[in-house]
Image (cartoon, grey):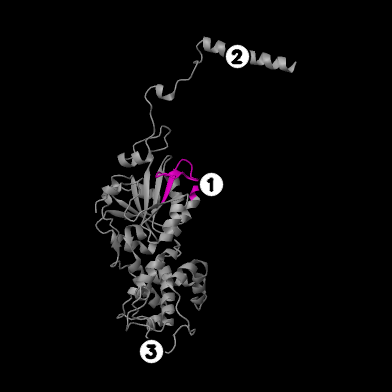
Amino acid sequence: MYTSLKLNARLFCTFLVSATVSEGWLPTKTPPLHFQGTRQTKPSFRDSMLRGSSSVDNDSRGVEKNLCLVSWEGCLADTVQWRTDEGVAVCQKVWPDLEVLLSDDDDYQWLYNKVRDLQHVLALDPQYSPTVEFALLIRMLLEEQELDQGRSNGSRGKYGSKYHPRAGDAFSAADDEPSFNKRKQRPLTVGEIAANWQDSLREAVLIRYHHEEGRNPLDILQLAVNQREATPTTLEWKNFKDFDVLRDHCDSIIVVAPHSSDLAAVRASLDGVSHAVCESIKTALDLPAGTLAVVCRSKQLVRKTLETLPIDSSVSILESSWSVLQNNILVFGDRVPRQTDRPQPCAVDGRNLQLSLWRSVHPDDQAAALMNAWTHYQEETEWPTTVLSVNSIRQ
């Protein structure tokens, strides 16, 4: 009986479909989409970049935007020497006793070299200026070098000539004992510091340099940074002087300053370029055409940017610090992007995101960004292909 009912039901459905087709209610076969008039496809992200975004959603969601957030630190300006100079000045203000290790007549090229090769391990918290972390590292490097008591001064080896003072400079062997550390040990090497800074050394340094009143040394260093006037005389541009090229290919270019205390230096470095400091992404998007926006970094900057933009918008992040870039991976949520040169959907519905490490100085960071499924790595002289062709950059 069950088989008979099942057969009758199937025959009835067949009869109903045949009758519907015969009456002309339904087509016998749905034609392919490309046969139904002119096919209208949404332009790719790359095409939108090259032509300028012109698509408008029919449901009043606004005009989609193609936005690029570029880190000022490292991507647009080489700040290591300037940060080192500022860090030394801050150290002298917070710890006056360091004067015994510092002299205006000394050559601090060895210190510049060490800081440059260690900058990739520094913790860049948006709560503090990077100068704070530089100052913390510089104090430790000075005290570590004092342990050598001048024995390595004037070294000619590949390592010694790069990371030790010249003959006759500070830390002379005439000093009987180190003024800060009584332990008679060799100073830590650059490799040892790099391998242990994030896991243990930084915490040990914070404890060692804790203020007598119990205040966090980072807060005290930041206060000293705030009291200094920006003197970005040693900033160097990284072959990036023409913002007009980017304006031709992106709806908005936003320069990200690492901290509010760095805004004066950022603005001084952008002298001659029309720009404005904005308190929010919404304000930055409302700027007139031709005006560069500058915003301060925050932990939620990328997410807030995506939420501010209309549906179908895309954001490309260009960052030189791997520690900063990987913090934004959380914006993707549970989604794993495809390995393409275009922004991919993220946790913010209807928006696309791309994270690119650009002009990073350390090979470990480059390898990490290259192997990570959520990030991309761009060569030193290469601008991301989603934004601009390398050949079109005017040096």
Tell me which label, 3 or 2, sits earlier in the chain: 2
Q: Quadrant of residue 258?
A: bottom left
**Mark 1 or 2, which is nearer the eye?**
2
In the depicted structure, whether residue 268 falls above or below residue 101: above
Q: What whole-number distance in Å separates the C-alpha atoms at marks 1 and 3?
A: 61 Å
From the image, which quarter does the N terminus lie in?
Answer: top right
Task: Please tell me whether the stretch drawn in magenta is mainly helix, strand or loop.
Answer: loop
Residue 190's spot in the image, x, y percent? 43, 71
The type of residue carrying mark 1 is Asp
In the picture of the structure, the residue carrying the numbered disc 2 is 14
Query: CA separation, marks 3 and 2?
Result: 104 Å
**Residue 304 position (above or below residue 192):** above
On screen, residue 200 versus residue 315, left or right, reads right
- 10 Å neighbourhood of mark 1: few (<14), some, or many (≥20)? few
- Secondary structure category for the residue under label 1: loop
Tell me the kind of residue under disc 3: Ala
Q: Residue at point 26% right, 55% down? A: 241
Mark nearer the N terminus (1 vs 2): 2
The reply to whether residue 300 is visible in this rendering is no
Count of numbered marks: 3
**Residue 334 tag number:** 1
Q: Which residues are magenta?
A: 331-355
Which mark is first along the chain, 3 or 1? 3
| Residue 13 lies in quadrant | top right
Residue 254, given in percent of the width and then of the height, sits at 35, 52
Q: Are marks 1 and 3 in contact (CB under 8 Å)?
A: no
Residue 21 vertical position relative to residue 390 in the rendered view, above or below: above
Residue 174: image tag: 3
* Spot occupied by residue 264 in the image (x, y as percentages of width and height): 33, 63
- For this view, does 249 lie left or right of residue 95? left
